[in-house]
Image (cartoon, rainbow, N blue to C red):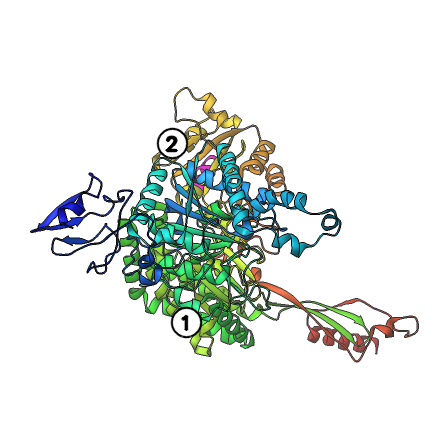
Amino acid sequence: MAFCHKVQYFQTKLSRCYQGKNNFTFRCGQVPLLQKNVILTKSHGWRNCTTFSSCNISSHHQRSILPRNTPLRSCESSQIRNISTSTPRTRAAAFRSDLKHCQKIVVKLGSAVITRDDECGVALGRLASIVEQVSELQQADRQMLVVTSGAVAFGKQRLQQEVMLSQSMRETLIPSNERFQSLLDPRACAAAGQSGLMSMYQSMFSQYGLTTAQVLVTKADFQHDYTRSNLRATLTELLRMKIIPIVNANDVIAPPPEADMDLHGVISIKDNDSLAARLAVEVNSDLLILLSDVDGIYSGPPEEEGSRLHDVMYPGDVVGIKFGGKSRVGLGGMESKVKSAVWTLERGCSVVIANGMKKDDVVLNIVNGRNVGTFFTETKPAGLAPDIQATRARDGGRLLQSLTPEKRAEIINRLADLLIERKEVILTANKRDLNRARMTSMAPPMVARLSLNEHKLLSLAEGLKQIAASSSDTVGRVISRTLVAEGMVLRKITVPIGVLIVIFESRPDCLPQVASLAISSANGILLKGGKEATESNKVLHSLVEEALDLHGAKDAVQLINTREQIGDLLQLEGLIDLVIPRGSNEMVSRIKKESKAIPVLGHADGICHVYIDKKADPDMAVKIVRDSKCDYPAACNAMETLLIHKNLQDTPLFDELLDMLRAEKVKIHPGPRLACSLKFGPAEAKSLKVEYSGLECAVEVVDGVNSAVDHIHKYGSSHTDVIVTEDESVANHFLESVDSACVFHNASSRFADGYRFGLGAEVGISTTRIHARGPVGVEGLLTTKWILEGTGECVQDFSQVGGKTYLHQKLPLHAEVEAEEEGEGTTTSS
């Protein structure tokens, strides 16, 4: 047949471009269909070309035409070559925090998530929750695509009654689960259940004003470029129209799962995991969420003792995983999910495997970057794994505990000296951080926190030497001694908490301070500084390691490289004993939420108040307010709200306070009461519960000390609050009534600091009501241990038969003092 006669079989919309004499190229996506009565085959020299989308047709090649119904034996998967997928537009997210920017998201609902426990019907509660989350994301201008299971289970529920009606009376009275199951063919169940499943989806999504579209696919649909092109075009158009495609494998005609015969790295469509993976790549999705009945990928079968959930998974780590069996109803199992995830990740789409059975907002939490499930990434942070770092910190902390107080003090003194000796190296690294911060337009208060200078280093070294001087009276200090009975002495002594995580933002000077407190209290510690201080933190940590190496305790202080590693550490309740976050309200709240088993010490906000009483000294009031607000406005102990007694509103002191704040370029936000009395002035404050962390503050008028206390309790954060007054009775009432970690009389709020309290430094400021409040120094990093020394006593000795009695007599803290007192008593009696 002549070449021109063959071309007429194609649709008239055929696009062609001449590349040479009698040589045509058919463009991808523009020749998706054939005439109804013909199909081209791959015979007669049409080599390595299975579609019309990317092939050259020359006039000297002959083609054969087959009738429409001729079986396509030559197009089976075993004969297909060069199958390709669409090229991803972007790389996969490196970290969980990047998932917030994902726009096109595929959510795969596993059979165990969709199906009820009896495998007959759909779990409506779970499905409704996921639909609500998907709808929320869709309405937030994300493009959502759902890959679902459940047609067989839905159909099984429908057909169950039909089967029962067809049974005889004897079969009905003597039920047999095996016979009942054998009567329900999965393909028939899928045929009966698919329409009902889609109707249910449409009904649920319509509650949120959204439209769905059904898409049924089989493995064969992915084996030909023209069918894949049609599928991709259809899905793209649906997403463009803000319609949610509901995709499912066509189980009515799908053949049973077979051995993987795919070529050139193209994943097989054997289950909905691989189907979701192929679809995610085809539509250039940013994120694939595989929901199953387990929390994620474990180091072994989840039911095995010692199996640990992987918060983050790297493709190279898959080799060492031991997989368990499949779920009660699914075809794929966890091994299939992992293979699908790795394949998808390699093609530029992020993947998270998580538990869809729980009631929490799993889909929303994943997209918001929360530590949920197992996140697949190719970006492996440098350094050791978090659990190894935690183990080394614990071992290093125990080594510190075995050292004498003098040796621990020697380490801290050496670190203080290194800060001065290496100041040029430190400041050079800090300059690189500052330059990068300015290029990213970092806010001035944050830049101030980030900045180091020679004066800061000198103050830092001085504070470290204070910590070293107090190290002799930290670990092992006797708090109480009790004579339980004759020959039995009970002691209560101080011991380290164990292993700490301290997370801080911006301020690199926190690193040597916190490290020194940990060394003094013999705690192992893992430090995570803000990424804006990366260069400074690296240099400072190297100095800490150098100082610790004096006595072989280099591993006691570990530096965490990425934020993602924090999520892993918060799951290590057997290795981590306390988390201390220092930073924004958002960060502290997130840490508290993610740390379910490890206690958290810290404060979320630093909303500090200064109350100017009617009997305040004017000069003192202006001086304290200036220092509290303007000395270091980015600090958590800076004043955020100024409260003024109503009697001062029309006095020179009131004007002087406002004039001083304006002169210091402080932006004033009047409270509701003050705003009502101002004819002209700034707009009323949007909220009185704001930590400005800059040259801004709220100003409000109150009736008196009781009103000030009520205001502080309502809007404060229990951090630091100040009263300025010459009335001692009013001052005492304020000091006793305000329930904050720090309450001052006639002193700046800026004194709420570990160094200024004489603690040498602080690991943070706690507004909680546990063992440590306010600036937390060495004392806050210690707990206690009871030591009982006896002479062979047993509990039975103190029964009626034994005859011994408890004394519970308080003894001096030191045995030497007790011996001296006993000696003096003997001399006197003689």
Horizontal and vertical percent position of residue 289? 44, 51
Q: Is residue 204 found left or right of 351 in the rendered image?
A: right
- Pick the residue in front: 790 or 478: 790
Query: Which of the pair 290/94 is nearer the observer?
Result: 290
**Residues drawn in magenta:** 616-625
Question: In the structure shown, which secondary structural element does the residue marked by tag 1 occupy?
Answer: helix
Q: Nearer the viewer, residue 125 or 453?
A: 125
Q: Residue at x 60, y 36 (%)?
A: 730
Return the disc, 2 or 1, that comes first in the chain's sequence: 1
Question: Residue drawn 61% across and 33% down?
Answer: 706
Magenta span: predominant SS is helix
Which of the labelled discs sits on residue 189, or is there none? none
Q: The C terminus appears in which quarter of the rendering? A: bottom right
On whether residue 617 falls in the magenta region, the answer is yes
x then y, percent, for residue 272: 46, 53
Amino acid type, callout 2: Asp
Q: Disc 2 versus disc 1: distance between alpha carbons?
A: 50 Å
Q: Position of residue 181 (x, y in %)?
A: 62, 53
The extreme top residue here reads: 679
Residue 461 visible, this orientation: yes
Query: Tag 1: residue type?
Result: Glu
Residue at disc 2, secondary structure: helix
Q: Which residue in the protein does label 2 denote?
A: 659
Query: Pointer 1: what residue?
Result: 545
List x then y, in percent, for residue 530: 39, 55
Q: Is residue 351 above or below residue 701?
A: below
Q: Is residue 486 magenta?
A: no
